[in-house]
Image (tube, rainbow, N blue to C red):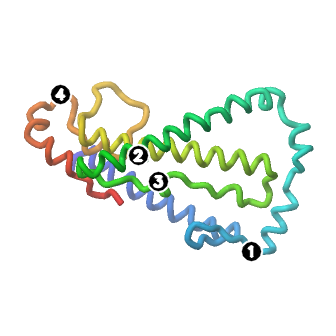
Amino acid sequence: MNTIQEIIERIKRLEQELSQELQKKEEEFAYQIRGKKIYFEEVTRKYHKTFTTKVHTYILHADFFNILTAPIIWFGIIPGAFLDLFATVFQAVCFPGYGIPKVRRSDYVVIDRHALSYLNMIEKLNCVYCGYFNGVIAYVQEIAARTEQHWCPIKHARKIKTIHSRYTKFFEYGDGENYRKHVEKIRRDFEGVD
């Protein structure tokens, strides 16, 4: 096994370990996940409410710059919604023809923090926005990654800041021989995709 593959395997093991540790938090903070809903024990919900900041107090103590920039941040919902719609239509139309498995939007767009009792209405609304927008970006990245695997599965020569889920399957930059021999195989290799 080569060094890159060994690192990938270690990363997968660490992700599984992280997932197990995160699940332990369910017990620590007394909640359960059933389907897509999160349930806190009644005692915990009441306790959380003691930490809620009233909306008027929250606004009075808000930094002026935060208030000033809020409309700019919230304007992002318009291009974000269009991006979400475009990506959903794009994969619905194109992926079946390419033989690419579709990305489940619900795996990426997770909106659940608004259910926390210790958040006031403004904080809850902000959490919905962040969960939606960051989820859409992750969803679009996965759609783009699968599209790139089909059309251009070649690694970059220059270092990139992050790699997406399909990048490790790509050909090395400059490896024209393997590219020509195996590009069709790589275009269809979606092993490990849910």
Secondary element at tag 1:
loop
- Front disc: 2 or 1: 2
Q: Position of residue 112 (x, y in %)?
A: 64, 58
**Disc 4 to disc 3, C-alpha distance:** 34 Å
Q: Which mark is residue 89?
A: 2
Which one is closest to the eye, mark 3 or mark 2? 2
Name which residue type carries label 3: Arg
Task: Tell me which label, 4 or 2, sits earlier in the chain.
Answer: 2
Q: Nearer the viewer, mark 1 or mark 3?
A: 3
**Residue that mark 4 sits on:** 174
Assign a secondary structure to mark 4. loop
Q: CA distance from mark 2 to mark 1?
A: 40 Å
* Disc nearest the viewer among 4 and 3: 3
Q: Which residue is mark 3?
A: 105
**Which of pointers 4 and 2 indicates the residue nearer the eye?**
2
Label 1 Cα crowd, 10 Å radius (few <14 / some 14-19 / many 20+):
few
**N-term-proximal mark, 2 vs 1:** 1
Task: Identify the secondary structure beneath mark 2.
Answer: helix
Q: Which residue is mark 1?
A: 41
Cα–Cα span, label 1 and label 3: 29 Å
Mark 3 or mark 2: whose residue is earlier in sequence: 2
**From what the image shows, is residue 43 above or below residue 70?**
below
Q: CA distance from mark 3 to mark 2?
A: 12 Å
Q: Helix or strand or loop: what does disc 3 sit on?
A: helix
Q: Are marks 4 and 3 in contact (CB under 8 Å)?
A: no
Q: Amino acid at mark 4?
A: Gly
Q: Amino acid at mark 1?
A: Glu
